[in-house]
Image: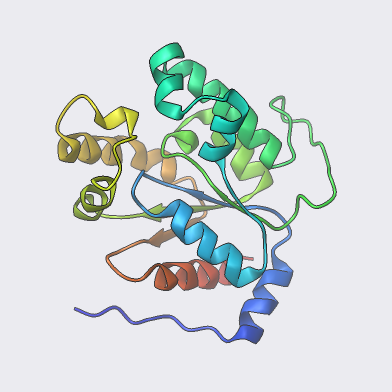
Amino acid sequence: MELDTPTLTAAEIGRIARRIDRPVVLVGMMGTGKSTVGRKLANMLGLPFVDADDEIERAAQMTIPEIFDTYGEPYFRDGERRVIARLLGRSTTMIPQIHPGLGGKIVATGGGAFCDAATRALILDAGIAVWLDSDVDTLVERVGRKGNRPLLRNGNPREILARLREDRAPAYAHAPLHVTSAQAPHLHTALSILKAIDAWL
C-alpha cells in the first residue's frame, strides 16, 4: 500500500515557520528517525537543529555508552534533563530563563528522555512535543545500523525494542502531536510533522 505524500508549498512552509515561537521537540523510540527527520525539518523551516544526545556527549566529554557504563542510567537521565532544560531556555527548577533566540528551533531527544517525568514536564512547558512513532519492524531495521545503543546490548534487540515501545507508549502519549515515521522517505515524515504543527498551533 502506498502512502499519500503530503505536500506543502514554500509559502505554506514559510507561514508555518513564522508561527513557531518555541522549540519543536521530537520524542519517541530510538530508530524512529528523530535526528534525521529533525535535520530535514530544520532545513525546510530555516531553523537551527540540535541533537540532545550530541549535546550531552559534548558536555560530558564522553559517549553515551561510556556514561551508562561508568555512572549508570540514573546519572545519565539527570544530565540529560539539565541539557534539555538548557536547550529549551529553562532551568531544572522550572523557573523560566528567557534568552533571545530560543524561540524556533528543532530539538531531537533520546528515546528515554520523555519518559522521565521531570524532563517531560520541561518539554511540555517550553516546547511543542511531537511523538515520532514507528512499528517494531521499522525500529529493528533502523537500529541494526548502529552498535551504540546501550539499552540493546544485553538481549534480543527485537524483544527489547518491543518491550520498550510498549512500556514507553503511555509517556509518549502525553505529547500533543503524534506522527508515524514509516518505511517512507524522511521528507514524508517531515511534511507530516509540519501539517500536524500547523493544525495544532
Q: Does residue 191 appear anywhere in the picture?
A: yes
Left or right of 172 in this view: 121: right
* Residue 130 percent location from the top left of the image: 50, 54
> How is the rendered protein coloured?
rainbow
Residue at x-position 66% and y-position 56% = 105
Residue at x-position 27% and y-position 40% = 166
Occupied quadrant, residue 68: top left
Most distant residue in the front direction: 61
Left or right of 164 in this view: 106: right
How many numbered discs? 0
Occupied quadrant, residue 56: top right
Pick the front one: 129 or 61: 61
Q: Is residue 154 above or below residue 134?
A: above
* Residue 128 percent location from the top left of the image: 60, 53
Residue at x-position 28% and y-position 46% = 143
Q: Is residue 26 above or below residue 90?
A: below
Q: Is residue 79 above or below residue 124?
A: above
- The quadrant of the rendering that contains the N terminus is bottom left
Residue at x-position 42% and y-position 67% = 189
Q: Does residue 118 appear anywhere in the picture?
A: no
* Residue 48 percent location from the top left of the image: 66, 57
* Residue 139 percent location from the top left of the image: 26, 50
- The quadrant of the rendering that contains the C terminus is bottom right
